[in-house]
Image (spheres, rainbow, N blue to C red):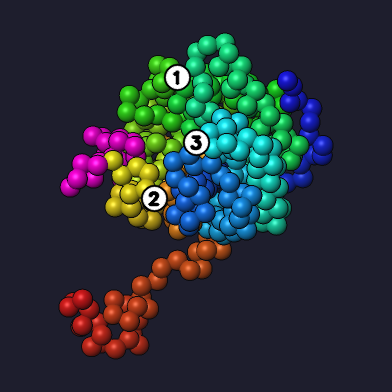
Amino acid sequence: MSVSGTRTEPLTRLSLLERLRQGPVVCAEGYLFECERRGYLQAGAFVPEVVLDHPEVVRQLHRDFVHAGSDVVQAFTYYAHREKLRLIGKLELLEEINRKALGIAREVADESGTLVAGGLSNTNVYANEADARREVRSMFEEQVRWAAEANVDFIIGETFDYFEEGMIALEVMKEAGIPSVVTFAIHQAEQTRDGVTAEDACRLAAETGADVVGLNCSRGPRTMLPILERIRPVVEGYLAALPVPYRTTPEQPTFQSLRDPERGEMPFPTALDPFVCTRYEVADFGLRAQELGINYLGLCCGAGPHHVRSLAEALGRRPPASRYSADMSKHAFFGTDSTLKPENQEYASQL
């Protein structure tokens, strides 16, 4: 199946590469976790049925992320592929979910002037066998075709823990003639499941033609940055970093490997709250990533608009949401404003 030649009109806004040449691009992700927190998506299968059941929720979340500083509206098609829809017995909704998600994203991008991106994700059926590879390719081809017909600015292929699966996605995106971002998920072994180091995975993807390469998901800022430091010298082009906003450690480097210190239980995915990074930790990550020369920045599962705002502000931006960034000088007890009652400030020491 070919997906090439299906665009119907030229782009009029700045392209992804044009924006990257002007400076870092911020891309907000994390729709699965945020919709689950809001009560519109079930953890486990994590199929984005909310696109059909409550499109207003997805539309508003897009707007919230743009308001917070995202330069990209990513269509909520993560896990909206054939395998996930089969798993929940709703394969007949596959095309409808994808087209609806792309339409919502296009609507918000057009009203905000941001880029609109399609999305591919790990299929969970990849294996180094001809039949499995054909199945993966077929799944990507149909999603890329729908994205191309929606005239997306680029497509994000993400969370590939198999290097070869990411390369199949890249091949399909290239055949469609659409700019691509390809990011790998690196687990505890610091390599893909088919044995390719993070450095080689990103280097080879870039050499094969990906416009942006890098890492997303799985690791938090603290445990993703050291790997990015190794990747940057071997990748000449644009590099992406989209960690999960959780306090992963060298001992527990992924949010799947985190354990509750008292019970020893795995908090992934619904009890991660004690491990969430503050907005200030996210800002610190943004500064360190920018110093490394990382050009495409964002956050993955677990991120909220306040995290995105802090990331954007760390890069020197003032998104609309910055109007409401914290100003503790006006706080009744902890403020410094000269008009505040001094007895309230004295009382603050007892709080």
Q: Which quadrant would the C terminus be assigned to in this image?
A: bottom left
The label number, if any, that marks residue 282 in the structure image: 2
How crowded is the residue under tag 2: few (<14 C-alpha within 10 Å), some, or many (20+)?
many
Location of mark 1 (residue): 200
Of residue 119 and residue 324, the one placed in the foreground of this image is 119
User: Which badge, 2 or 3, comes first in the chain's sequence?
Assistant: 3
The local secondary structure at tag 3 comes to strand
Give the x, y percent position of residue 175. 70, 22
Of residue 207 and residue 185, the one placed in the foreground of this image is 185
The answer for how far apart the CA atoms under marks 2 and 3 are is: 15 Å
User: Which badge, 2 or 1, comes first in the chain's sequence?
Assistant: 1
Q: Is residue 65 above or below residue 337?
A: above
Q: Is residue 63 above or below residue 155?
A: below
Whether residue 285 is visible, yes or no, is: no
The amino acid type, in three-letter code, at marker 1 is Asp
The local secondary structure at tag 1 comes to helix
- The structure residue drawn at horizontal position 46% and vertical position 36%, both measured from the top left corner, is 216
Magenta range is 247-265
Give the x, y percent position of residue 191. 38, 22
Q: Is residue 216 magenta?
A: no
Question: Residue 121 appears in which quarter of the rendering?
Answer: top right
Of residue 29 and residue 41, the one placed in the foreground of this image is 41
The label number, if any, that marks residue 240 in the structure image: 3
- The structure residue drawn at horizontal position 47% and vertical position 22%, both measured from the top left corner, is 162
- The structure residue drawn at horizontal position 31% and vertical position 44%, both measured from the top left corner, is 267
Q: Are marks 2 and 3 in contact (CB under 8 Å)?
A: no
The amino acid type, in three-letter code, at marker 3 is Ala
